[in-house]
Amino acid sequence: MARAATKKKPAAKAKTPQKPKPKRRARKPKEPPRFSILVCIDESEESLEALKYAVRVGSGTDADLTLLYVRPIDQGLRTGGLQISVVRENLLDWGLELPGMAALKRGRELLVELGWLDKDWETEFAHVDVTGDPLGDNAIVYSCPTGRSIVLRLLVAPSVAYGILDEAKLGEFDLVMIGWNAAEEESGPGHITPAIADRVAREHVGSVLVTRALEESHGHLVCVSEHRGSILSARKDAQIAARCACPVYLLSVAKNEAGLKVAKRAVASAKREIEKVGVRVSGESVHVGDPVSIIVEEGKKYSVIVVSRFQRRSGWRQIFSNSIAFKVLDRAENSVMVAR
């Protein structure tokens, strides 16, 4: 009897050795963002007062500071017979009175005096040639092991305002500070007039603090409206105020009784947003009347009046209407921050 055919089992495939799976590398914890401040200086005492306040705002090791002096392009710049390369290498050590160097030296000395800069920090020099100007753009960068850096920058530009706006835009600073010098006449090639300070506050896309008659520790009066941008600007300033232990007070102004409910709601919304980031609101008030007059008068009790501004883009500059924010900036007797 014929046997039934049996099916042969297919031969087992040889197993290829498995490559060991690479071990996942532990992700490095993200470093917290740095807080960067640009202080625009000239030969005035007002610019030194702005620098002192910047040191308070920059308390802690997470803050970086840039001192900026802008001078117009000068084809006839004299270096006292020294080769320009020697001048660059000894930018802060020689005794020549080149435009801007006296202001930068005073700023550096103040930072040392306040304990914000140590002469033993690492130093690096940077230079960029500028057509038509023998000295060009120059900067000295100081850095310490904790990560903080201080930059002294001598910048060449067609105008002081133009140079400040370009540096502020390129550096993406968290805060730009500029002293308000009441003297309209230019006392030097890098003098910052009220018109320059006003233009920087109007055209820069970030927050600008214009300091004048600055008295510390009196707190920030933050003016808010029902707009979402105003609420977020209030939260941002509250975080800045907290850096220098400045109390925060909220104010909203209704033009008439009909707008009183909206003003109260704006203050409540701002308070909630500020408390979300761990900052305490020390006081709040709502008034009825002309917003500019009330803000200017109430603001006299505080170190800084904070107003927010909304803008629409046109190219790479900003176009603004004649708003409450800039009427306050022009009429106030104390420091004003235009927050964005």
Image (cartoon, helix red, strand yellow):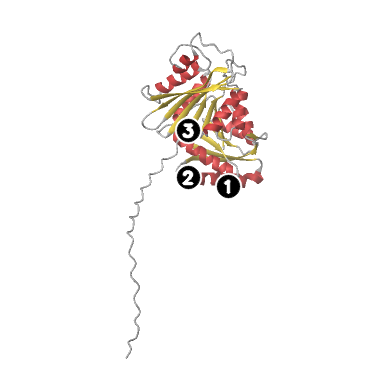
Density class for disc 3 (Cα within 10 Å; few <14, some 14-19, many ≥20) is many
The amino acid sitting under disc 1 is Arg
Q: Which residue is mark 3?
A: 36
Disc number placed over residue 265 in the picture, else none: 1
Q: Which residue is mark 2?
A: 275
Q: Give how far apart the Cα atoms at labels 1 and 3 are.
A: 33 Å
Give the percent coordinates (x, y) of residue 338.
Answer: 57, 34
Point out the residue furthest to the top here: 81
- Is 85 on the left-hand or right-hand side of 192? left
Q: Is residue 270 above or below residue 50?
A: below
The amino acid sitting under disc 3 is Ser
Q: Give how far apart the Cα atoms at labels 1 and 2 are.
A: 15 Å
Give the percent coordinates (x, y) of residue 58.
Answer: 44, 31
Density class for disc 2 (Cα within 10 Å; few <14, some 14-19, many ≥20) is few
Upstream in the sequence, badge 1 or badge 2?
Answer: 1
> In the picture, which quadrant includes the C terminus?
top right
- Is 276 on the left-hand or right-hand side of 313? left
Give the structural element (helix, strand or loop) at label 2: helix
Residue shown at 46%/26% (left/top)?
A: 151
Density class for disc 1 (Cα within 10 Å; few <14, some 14-19, many ≥20) is some
